[in-house]
């Protein structure tokens, strides 16, 4: 059984997290079936034993999520690799582990594996945390490297071979030089993205339009598919954040529109999120790169600071990657376009400020806010140095 030193077995923790199904509201009928469309109003479900059940409904919601992808061009990838779905169910420690990918899933898995004392490497093809602010992303990876996670940059796996000793020999290619290299690992974890679970649903025969490249369902602003009474939510839908809280919120709003005569649509702008790496990274709104792309470099102002959390000071920890930046429009009250924070409890900090940004907060509002001392969040209310100025952004004193 895979143990985290003095912690509970991870697979028992995972079991407790999934036990919510038995606690569903009594008005919800849970059917453990694999479903596919028969027609626009009919679903055929098949149980593990092969028993068929036919269900009909006026409205149908596709919320099948996604599963980890494996590369199809790397011999041995599927046979000898695992995914983030598998890691918590291992009966033994994964040992020396290679994580392939640079998504938040990849970095989070590598971070906690390093944290429990395992020799862990991450192989990155191009950039970390694609879609996130790249300055912040590299602060996260710099911190992880300084605390023991190894990074294999600009490389891609070529093959995975099982050795007689039980280990895995992984061969990879350096994209800059074209040279091949390799090493031996106990476990190889693929975290190169997720594919939507839509292929087996039979969507094409009922006229639901799917993006052929991504496999995701095309939806409108009200989450409806090309068939009006069929909806799609979460990871199965195109151009939606792949975040559980977002799908839950969208689902609640859809239920109210369908059954409570409500009209409110899900707002997919300014959705806050946090990457739970050893140094947490929380953000809401636009990255600096995206703000420049939309508004032009001359029309944005970036306020920033390097700060030292109190808990880092007491423990004598390096805080050189603890950083805050707020991206604003330059004119007027300087409406906040994005907030980015690396440091302790980044999720808690970001959640609070996300409300203000959703309500149209400006830099003037931020400066009118009294900080709570001593907290990390108060540093956001004291930002006054701009990137444009070139001044040292290191916080000194209280």
Image: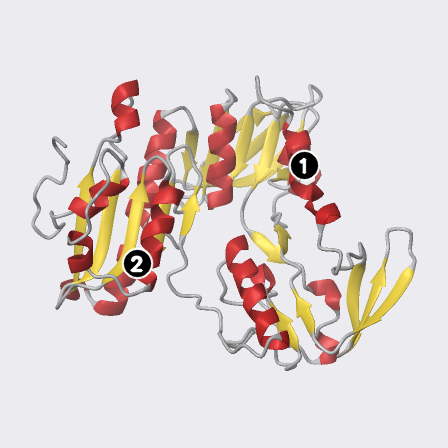
First-in-chain label (1 vs 2) = 1
Label drawn at residue 356: 2
The image quadrant of residue 139 is top left
Q: Residue at x 18, y 42 (%)?
A: 305
Q: Secondary structure at mark 2?
A: helix
The answer to whether one can see residue 272 in this image is yes
Label 1–label 2 contact, CB within 8 A: no
Q: Residues within 10 Å of mark 1 (few under 14, many from 20)?
A: few
- The location of residue 132, given as percent across then percent down, is 37, 52
Label drawn at residue 16: 1
The answer to whether one can see residue 286 in this image is no
The N terminus, quarter of image: top right
- The location of residue 217, given as percent across then percent down, is 60, 70
The C terminus, quarter of image: top left
Q: Residue at x 20, y 37 (%)?
A: 306
Label drawn at residue 174: none
The image quadrant of residue 397 is top left
Q: Residue at x 23, y 52 (%)?
A: 326
- Left or right: where does residue 45 sit relative to residue 181? right
- The location of residue 125, given as percent across then percent down, is 45, 45
Q: Is residue 83 above or below residue 262?
A: above
- The location of residue 175, given as percent across then percent down, is 42, 43
């Amino acid at each position: 059984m895979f143990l985290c030193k003095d912690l509970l077995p991870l697979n028992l923790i995972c079991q407790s997290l999934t036990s919510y199904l038995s606690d569903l509201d009594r008005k919800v009928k849970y059917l453990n079936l694999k479903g596919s469309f028969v027609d626009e109003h009919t679903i055929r479900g098949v149980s593990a034993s092969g028993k068929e059940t036919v269900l009909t409904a006026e409205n149908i919601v596709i919320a099948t999520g996604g599963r980890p992808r494996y590369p199809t061009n790397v011999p041995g990838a599927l046979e000898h690799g695992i995914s983030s779905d598998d890691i918590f169910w291992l009966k033994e420690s994964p040992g020396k582990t290679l994580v392939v990918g640079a998504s938040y899933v990849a970095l989070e898995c590598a971070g906690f594996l390093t944290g429990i004392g395992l020799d862990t490497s991450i192989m990155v093809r191009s950039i970390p945390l694609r879609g996130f602010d790249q300055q912040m992303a590299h602060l996260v990876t710099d911190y992880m490297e300084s605390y023991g996670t190894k990074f294999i940059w600009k490389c891609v796996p070529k093959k995975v071979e099982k050795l007689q000793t039980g280990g895995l020999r992984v061969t990879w290619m350096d994209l800059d030089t074209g040279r091949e290299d390799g090493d031996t690992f106990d476990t190889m974890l693929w975290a190169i993205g997720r594919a939507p679970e839509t292929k087996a649903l039979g969507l094409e025969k009922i006229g639901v339009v799917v993006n052929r490249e991504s496999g995701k369902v095309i939806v409108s602003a009200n989450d409806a598919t090309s068939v009006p009474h069929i909806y799609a939510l979460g990871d199965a839908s195109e151009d939606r954040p792949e975040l559980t809280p977002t799908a839950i919120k969208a689902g609640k709003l859809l239920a109210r529109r369908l059954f409570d005569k409500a009209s409110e649509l899900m707002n997919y702008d300014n959705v806050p999120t946090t990457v739970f790496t050893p140094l947490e990274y929380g953000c809401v709104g636009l990255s600096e790169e995206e703000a420049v792309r939309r508004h032009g470099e001359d029309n944005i102002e970036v306020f920033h600071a390097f700060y030292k959390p109190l808990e880092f000071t007491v423990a004598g920890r390096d805080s050189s990657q603890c950083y805050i930046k707020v991206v604003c429009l330059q004119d007027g009250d300087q409406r906040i376009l994005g907030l980015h924070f690396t440091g302790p409890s980044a999720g808690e900090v970001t959640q609070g400020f996300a409300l203000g940004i959703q309500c149209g907060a400006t830099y003037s509002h931020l400066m009118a806010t009294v900080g709570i001392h001593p907290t990390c969040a108060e540093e956001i209310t004291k930002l006054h140095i701009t990137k444009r100025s070139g001044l040292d952004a290191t916080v000194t004193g209280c």
